[in-house]
Amino acid sequence: MRAPSTRVACDTTADRDSRDRRRTNFHAPLAAHVPCPRPPTLIADPDNPRALALEDQYCAHNYLPLPVVLSRGDGVWVWDTQGRRYLDMHSAYSAASHGHANKRILAALEHQARRLAIPSRAFHSDQLGPFAEKLCQLSGFEMVLPMNTGAEAVETAIKAARRWGYRVKGVPSDRAEIIVADGNFHGRTTTIIGFSSEPEYRDGFGPFPPGFQSVPFGDLGAAERAIKPETVAILVEPIQGERGIVVPPPGWLAGLRRLCDKKGVLLILDEIQSGLGRTGAWFAFEHEGVRPDCLVLGKALGGGIFPISAFLANRTVMQVFDPGSHGSTFGGNPLAAAVALEALRVIEDEKLTERSRLLGDRLMHRLRAISHPAIREVRGRGLWVGMVIDPAIMSARALSEELLNHGILAKETHDTVIRFAPPLVILREELDWGLDRVEVALSRLSP
């Protein structure tokens, strides 16, 4: 019989300065568990009914959140309105990779907000150039076009590829085609959902624009067969996050690179979730030693504080944009640029890519070591792992809710996968603390 639903609260007075020091030296010996001076206290389940009621009454019902009302966060921890603490194993789909309320990023935000925030791109600012230089140096691209959200950056990539096709490749006007992958998730605009293979994303939102051809993810032969004279680009995620952290076969990205070179097609990689250290490298494409022609970034670029995204390419592609051809009132504003620059510096200074690689191995090893009939597969890379659940035994939603009861924030996708993606600043003992509770939660739902 399933145990009564409870949630765990734990003392949160651990020495933060000591934790900050260990985050910059994660090779140092660590205790087995997060300090917890008094035994955990089991607290009854009711949460903040007024907050839930207000959202239900006044907000569109386009999300199905877990039943918890969060009020603050610090590092890898968040608290609800009742004071209960949770380990964040979700990281806002990688947007909070730096942890919550990162001190350095908050300081950069406050400093710039008091100087100049939103003048628009009608004028130059003293922040955009330094941010663009840093991002180009880290990524190896020559130019960047900053936007605000991931979907905007993907739309920018689509516009760039089409115009490049017309002006450089010589594709007849309005005939450009882009190849995408089944199971993709690149955003929620009508253009983007038009080439989604998920019926729920498309239902009732057509008609959709033409110009996209979808092929099976990881199938190099299918991609080659889909290329036509009008094909201008292949747009894919190196790892499909929303689909359940699906890793393609080894060599697939390298094969796409060779194919694009052979056919004169741009390779565009969407690393909105996978980029900036999440997979144990700055960018997921580095694992196969390839480089795309264009790169899309977002989420973690804002340091968990401010929305900013970017489309990167070399000058031969980026030169298709001229004044008035593309823009955004908020894109590249000095406040976002200052935050993003510090976010990049934090990843670099605190060696968060290396942390993701080392602790990601630990995360994968411990999850794969769990023996439970409901676990079909554990897959991923770095601190980005999906646990595939057998729906005949339990639902991923039920497991998400049980994890919540044990002080873990994680979220299901497509009803069959639980994603584990803690902030990259997580300590080894914090990770172990969470994984211990994952095992307990699974045992509570045993058939």
Image (spheres, rainbow, N blue to C red):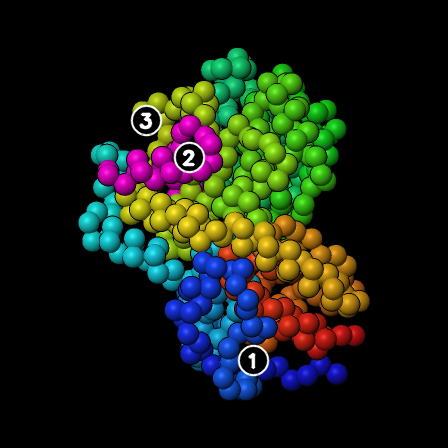
Marks 2 and 3, the one that precedes in the sequence: 2
| Residue 434, horizontal then vertical, whole percent | 59, 70
Residue at which label 1 appears: 7
Instruction: Examine the structure image and report whether residue 147 is included in the region drawn in magenta.
Output: yes
Label 2: few (<14), some or many (≥20) within 10 Å? few
Seen in the picture, residue 339 relative to 16 is either above or below; the reply is above
Say which residue label 2 marks: 137
Disc 2 to disc 1: CB gap under 8 Å:
no
**Which badge, 2 or 1, is on the more N-terminal residue?**
1
Q: Amino acid at mark 2?
A: Gln
Q: Secondary structure at mark 1?
A: strand
x and y percentages locating residue 50 in the rendered image: 42, 77
Which three-letter amino acid code belongs to the residue tagged 1?
Answer: Arg
Q: Which amino acid type is shown beneath numbered disc 3?
A: Gly
Residues 385 and 354: in front is: 354
The magenta segment is 125-152
Residue under the image location 59 percent in, 76 percent down: 406
* Residue farthest left in this picture: 115
Q: CA distance from mark 1 to mark 3?
A: 54 Å
Contact, mark 1 vs mark 3 (Cβ under 8 Å): no
Residue 24 falls left or right of residue 335: right
Helix, strand or loop under label 3: loop
User: What is the C-alpha distance between the residues marked 2 and 3?
Assistant: 27 Å
Residue pictured at 37% horizontal, 30% vertical: 326
Q: Which residue is mark 3?
A: 324
User: At 56% from the left edge and 31% from the top edge, which residue is drawn?
Assistant: 291
